[in-house]
Image (spheres, helix red, strand yellow):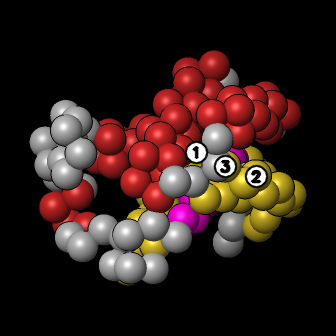
Amino acid sequence: MTLSLSKDTIQVSKEQDVVFLKNRVKETAVKIKMGLVNQTRLLTACSELVRNMMRYADGGSCLIEVVSSGRNNGVRLTFTDNGPGIPDIAAAMRDGFSTGRSLGLGLPGTKRLVNEFDIKSKVGEGTVVTILKWANG
């Protein structure tokens, strides 16, 4: 069972918010004594998801949580937007698929960087992506 120990929601609508969010995620990871390699993986995943949120949905919010399961502590990030949504999640999760002139490695690459990854999207309503990185995982 995973317990949430703290929560902080950051609204992201402009570039300055992205910097603030990434700094807050870094502070949270340091606070739970996450190693540097895992911090880098978490911040890289965060950067990709916030970039998607800004590019495709003109912003949204990110819930930052410190979570615990037994002796493991981790950081869970939930990105929520009210953008156009993703019509085909299976396609979006394949390497090389893109609708926006990119390499199409963002979502599948993000999934590989974290311990848990979940995406829900409804066309016309928005997208919610949740990732979790354990401090020692």
Marks 1 & 3, CB-CB < 8 Å contact:
no
On the question of residue 136 being in view, the answer is no
Q: Which residue range is magenta in the image? A: 74-81
**Amino acid type of the residue tagged 1 in the rendering:** Lys
Contact (CB < 8 A) between labels 3 and 2?
Answer: yes
Whether residue 109 is visible, yes or no, is: yes
Q: State which quadrant residue 101 falls in.
A: top left
| Vertical relation: 48 (above or below) 85 | above
Which residue is tagged 3?
12
Mark 2 secondary-structure assignment:
strand
> Label 3 is placed on what type of residue?
Val
Q: In the image, 106: left or right of 39? A: left
Image quarter in which the N terminus is found = bottom right
The residue pinned by badge 1 equals 133
Is the stretch drawn in magenta largely helix, strand or loop?
Answer: strand
Residue density around tag 1, few if under 14, some if 14–19, many if 20 or more, within 10 Å: many
Pointer 2 residue: 10
Cα separation, mark 1 vs mark 3, equals: 21 Å
Q: Kindly identify the residue that appears in the image at 16 percent across and 61 percent down.
A: 91
- Compute the Cα span from label 1 to label 2: 18 Å
SS category of the residue bearing label 1: strand
Left or right of 75, for residue 105: left
